[in-house]
Amino acid sequence: MVDYVWLIPFFPAVGFVINGLLGRKYIKDRSHYPGVISVGLSLLVAILVFWEVAFGRGGGDVVLYQWIIGTGLEANVGFLIDPLSAVMIMVVCGVGFLIHVYSIGYMHGDGGYYRFFAYLNLFMFSMLILVLADNYLLMFVGWEGVGLCSYLLIGFWFQKKSAADAGKKAFVVNRIGDAGFLLGLFLIYSLFGTFNFIPVFENAHILTAATATIITLCLFVGAVGKSAQIPLYVWLPDAMEGPTPVSALIHAATMVTAGVYMVARSHVLYSLSPYSMAVVALVGAFTAIFSASIGLTQNDIKRVLAYSTVSQLGYMFLACGVGAFGAAIFHLMTHAFFKALLFLGSGSVIHALQGEQDMRKMGALKPHTPRTYWTFLIASLAIAGIPPFAGFFSKDEILWQAFSSPHGSLWLWLMGVAAAGMTAFYMFRLIFLTFHGSSRVEPEVAHHIHESPNNMTIPLIILAFLSVVGGWVGIPEALGGSNQIHHFLARVLEHGAHPDPPIHSTSLEFLLMLISILVAATGIFLAYHMYIRRPELPARLAGRFPGIYQALLNKYWVDELYQYFVVNPIKRGMRFLWDLDNYIVDGAVNGTGFITVLNSRLSGIFDLYTVDGAVNSMSTLFNNGARGFRRLHTGLVHNYALAMVFGIFIFVSLYLFFI
Amino acid sequence: MPELIKFSIPLLSLTLFIPLLGAVIIMLFIPKQRTSLIKWFAFIISVIDFLVSLPLVKYFDPSTNAMQFVEQHSWIPSIGVEYFLGIDGISILLVMLTTLLTAVSVLCSFMAIDYREKEFYVCLLLLSTGMLGVFMALDFFLFYVFWEVMLVPMYFLIGVWGGGRKLYSAIKFFLYTLFGSVIMLLGILTLYFLTPEPHTFNILKMTYELNIPEGLQKWLFLAFFIGFAIKVPMFPFHTWLPDAHTDAPTAGSVILAGVLLKMGTYGFVRFNLPMFPEASHFFVPFMAVLAIIGIIYGALVAMAQEDVKRLVAYSSVSHLGFVMLGIFALNPQGIVGGMLQMINHGLSTGGLFLLVGIIYERRHTRMISDFGGLSHRLPIFSTLFAITMLSSIGLPGLNGFVGEFLILLGVFKATYIYAVFGVTGIILGAAYMLWLYQRMMFGSLDKPENQKLKDCNLREIIYMVSLIIFMFWIGLYPKPYLNIMGPTVDKLVERVNPAYFQTAQQSPLPQK
C-alpha cells in the first residue's frame, strides 16, 4: 500500500481540477460530490497506509520523479512514509474529511460553492504534499501551496474589504517567514548537497553547533510565520474573516500546525543546538501565555478561538523546545480534534444566529442547539485539560516534559500552567456567554434560532467522540497507561526524544498533574463565578483596571505598532523612491536630453549667426563685389579694349619705373 | 572553442527569415484595406515560424556544449564579416520564446490595433526577425546589425500605435538604447582589432582565442556593460522602461518585456562572462549590488504605482534584477536559474501585459483605482490573472519558483549575504502583486462602467492558455529546460569561474 501513497494527494488534486474547470458552469451546487468524495478516498488510502505503518512496521521513501535537476542539484518529488507522516496524514485526511462534510451544510447556497470546494481540495493536496514530502524543497512547495489556499479562502468573501485585506496580510506575513525558511534551505543544501531528509539527518553530525543554530533558527522563522507565533502571529486572528470551516480546517487543525510538524521533522537538527531549542521553547511559552491573555477579553467568538489556537500552538513549540517532539505531535493531534470541533461548533452557532459572531449578542442558546452545546462542552473540557478528555493527556505530557526534561525548567512549566488556567477561563467564559445565562440575541434573529442540519452536527459528534478518546493513545505510564503514541512516534523521533529522566519520580508527576487540573478547574470556576453568578463583575473589573483591560481588549496594540513602525515606513519609502525615480533618476535622463536639446539650440543659433553668418557674409561680399564688377560687363568691345589698353599702360609703366 | 555542428537543413535561416518574408509579402502584395487578410496572414506566418522553430528543440543535442545548426558563409570578406548563425544551450530557449511570443503578440493585436494595420503587422514581423537574429548571430557585425535593426520597428510600434506620451517614450527608448549600443560598438571594434590578421568578427574566435590583458578586459567589460545594462535594464538605467511599456501597444509591451529585455541579459551571458572572465570576477560586487538595488527598488516603486502597466513595468526591473544576480553568482545554479528566469519572466510578465491589454481594450483605462470587484463580472479573466500573477511571484508549482529558487541558491552558495537581500524581493513581490490583485479583482463591483464588461473571448483564452501551459510545465517538470542549458552553462562556468569545479563540486557529505 505504501507504494500507492501518491494517491493520497492525487485524489484532492483531481477534485480541484474537476471543480476548478467545470464547477462554475456545470457542477455548480453539486460541487461537494467531487470535493468530498476525493477527500474520502484519500482518507481510505491514508487509513490503509497508516495501518501498514502502525502494525506492519511498513514505510519508506517513495520517489515519483526527479523535479529540479540542474548541475549537481537534485530534488525529488518523493514521499516519506514513517510514523510521523502517518499520524499527520491521518489527522489531515480525517479532520479534513469531516470538515468537508460539514461544509456541505454550512456553505449551502453560497454563490461561490464550487470555488469553495475547489480551494478546499487544493488545500488538502498542498497540505498532504507538505506532510508527505521526503525532502525540504518539496515540503516548501506544499508550504507555499497551503499559504496560497489560506489566502484564497480567507479572502473567499472577497467583496468584503476586510476579508480581502486579511487574506493579503496572511500571505505577506507568511512570506516573511518563508524567506527565513528559504535561507534555511539554502544553508542545508550548501552544507549537505541535498534536500532529502534521510541523508541530511544521517549526516547531521557534521554540523557544528553554530551552523546548526543558524539553520534551525532560519527554519524556525518559517515555522513562526506559518504557525502564527510571536512576532508573526498577527495574521491568524484576522484570518477569521474566512468561512468557518476554513478556520477549522486551515487555521486550527492542519495548516497552522505545519510549523510544528516541520520542527518535529527536523528534530535531529534542533537537537544539535541547545540555543535554538531554548529559543523555540521560549517563543512557544511566551506566545502561549501572551495570546491566551488576549483571548480573555475578546468578544468575537471566532477571535477567542483564534487566540486560543495561537496559544495552543505555543504549547506545541514549548514541547518541541524542551525536546518532547512526540508530545508536540500528540498535542497537535488532539488539538486538531477539539479545536476543529470548537470552530465547527462556533460555526453552528453563527449559522443558527444568521451570521452573528459577537458573544454580547448571544446567550442561552443551550436549549435551541443541544447537539452543538454538548459537543462544544466536550471540546472545551478537552482544551481546558480536564481528564479524561483528549487535551488533558497531551497537555499534561507537555507540562511534565517542560518541567522534567533536561531542556526544561520550573519557569517554563509555570508559564505553561498559567496559560492553561487562562485557557480554561476563556473557554468557559465563551460557553457561559454563548449557551447559558440570559439571551441577548437580537429580537429579529431570536425566533429563527435552530439547530444545524445533520450533515453539520454528525461531524461535530464524531469530533466530540475523538476529543474524548483521542488522548487515550497517550495515557502516561504514571497513570498506568502505556503511552502508545509516544512509543510509536519514537521510531522517528528517538534522536530528539531524550531518554526518560534518570530519577523518574512518579509522585512528582502526579503532583504536577494535580496542580494543573486544579488550575484548570479554578479557571472554569472563575468563569462561572464571573459570568453566571455575578454577571456584573466583569464590567466592574474592567472599570477597576482600565489599563490592563484596554491593553487586552486592543490586543496590546500590536497591529497598530506594526502599522506605525513597519507598514507606514514602507509606504512612505515607496512614495519617496517613486519620487526619486521620477525626479532624480529619470530627471538625470531627461536632463541629459534637455541639455542635448539646449546644446543643439545654441549650436543652431551659433550656426545661424556665426558659421552660417560667415558663409552668408562671404556670399554677401561676393554679391556686392559682383554688383561692382557687373558694371564692367557692359558687353561693349570698345570698353574692353579701353580696359585692356589701360592695363597694358599700367604694367608697362610699372615695368619702366621699377625695374 | 566549442565545436560546430551543422544540420542538413538551414533551420536557423528559415526561422530567421520567414517573418521577414511575411513582412515583405504583406508590404508588397496585400492592399491595406484587406485588414482581416493582413491579420490572419501575419498570424499564420508567425505560427509557421513557431512550427519551423520546433525542430530546433527536437534535433538539439542537449548533451553537448557545441554550437548547433551552424550556418557559416562568407559575407563581406574584405573586413572579415561572415553570415554565421548557430545556437547553443544559452540561446535555444530564447529563440523559442521569441517565436512563441511573436505569435501571441500578433494574436493579441487583432482588435487592439484599428488603424494602419498593414504597417503594424509588417513592423511586428520585422521585429521578430531582428530579435531572432540577435540570439542566433555568431558574427559580431551581424549581431550588431540585428541589434540595431530591431530598434526601428519597435520605435514605430511605440510611436505610432502607442498611447499617452507615445512620441516621448518612443524617442527615449530609441536614443537611450542607441547610446548604449554605440558604446558597445566601440568595444566590438576594439575586439575586432585585437584579433590577429586578418581581422575577424567571429564571436567564438573572439571569445576563446584572444588573451585580453585584465586592464583592457575591464574597459571592454564596461563598454559592453553600458550597452547591455541599459537594455536589461539595470538600475539606474531603467527609466526608459516604464515609459516605453506604458505607452506601447499591448503587443509592443509583450515583446518588449518578453524578449527585448532578455537581449541585455543574454548579452552578459554570451559576451561579458566568457570574453572577460577576470573582469567579470572583478565586477561581481558592483553587478550584484546594482542587481539587488534593482530588485528592492523596483519592487518598492512598483508598489507605489497607480497605473497597472507601470506597476508591471517596475516589477520587470525587480525581476530582471534577480536574473542579473543569478548570472553574476558565476556558478551553474545561478546562471541556469538566471537563464530560466529570463524565460519565466517572458511568460509571466508577457502574460500580465496581455491581461492588462485585455482589460484596457474593454475599459480604456489602466488606473488601478478605476477597477475593483472585477472577479464578480470576469471570472475567467481574474482566474487567468491570478495564475499569471502567482507565476510572477514565484509560487512553487509554477515556473517562477524554479528560476528564483535556483538563482537564490546559486547566489547563496557564492555569497550568502546577497541572497539574504535577494529574498526580501520575494516578500515585496508578493506584497505588490497581491495588493494589485486585491484592488482590481476583489471588493465590490461598484463602478458602473465595470458592470457591463465582457469576459475573455476564445481568442484571448487561447493565447493566455498557451502561455499558462508553459508556466505549469516549467513549474512541475523543469528538467528538460534545465537539461538543455546544462552543458553550455557548465562550459561557461568552467571558463569564467574555474575555481568552482575544483572546490565546490565535491559534496560536503562523506562519500558512501
Image (cartoon, grey):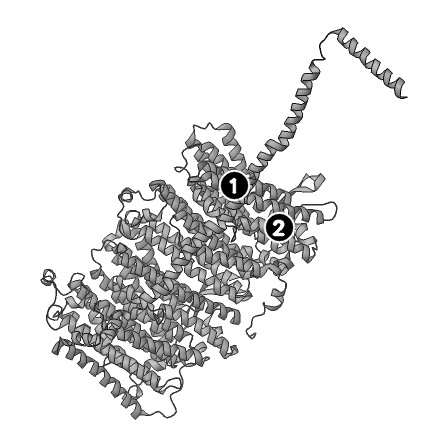
The quarter of the displayed image where residue A421 is located: bottom left
Classify B149 as above or below A274.
Answer: above
- Camera-nearest residue between A297 and A135: A297
Task: Residue type at mark 1: give it.
Answer: Ser
Q: Are marks 1 and 2 on the same chain?
A: yes
Of circles 1 and 2, the one toward us is 2
Task: Residue type at mark 2: give it.
Answer: Ala
Q: How far separated are the C-alphas under marks 1 and 2? A: 26 Å
For label 1, the crowd category at 10 Å Cα-Cα, with few meaning under 14, some 14 to 19 and many 20 or more, is many
Disc nearer the start of the sequence (1/2): 1
Q: Which mark is residue B223?
A: 2
Classify B111 as above or below A422.
Answer: above
Dot 1: chain letter:
B
Please provide percent x and percent y for residue B457. 34, 42
For label 2, the crowd category at 10 Å Cα-Cα, with few meaning under 14, some 14 to 19 and many 20 or more, is many
Q: Which mark is residue A265?
A: none
Q: Which residue is mark 1?
A: B128
* Residue A2 appears left or right of B145: left
Please provide percent x and percent y for residue A438. 10, 71
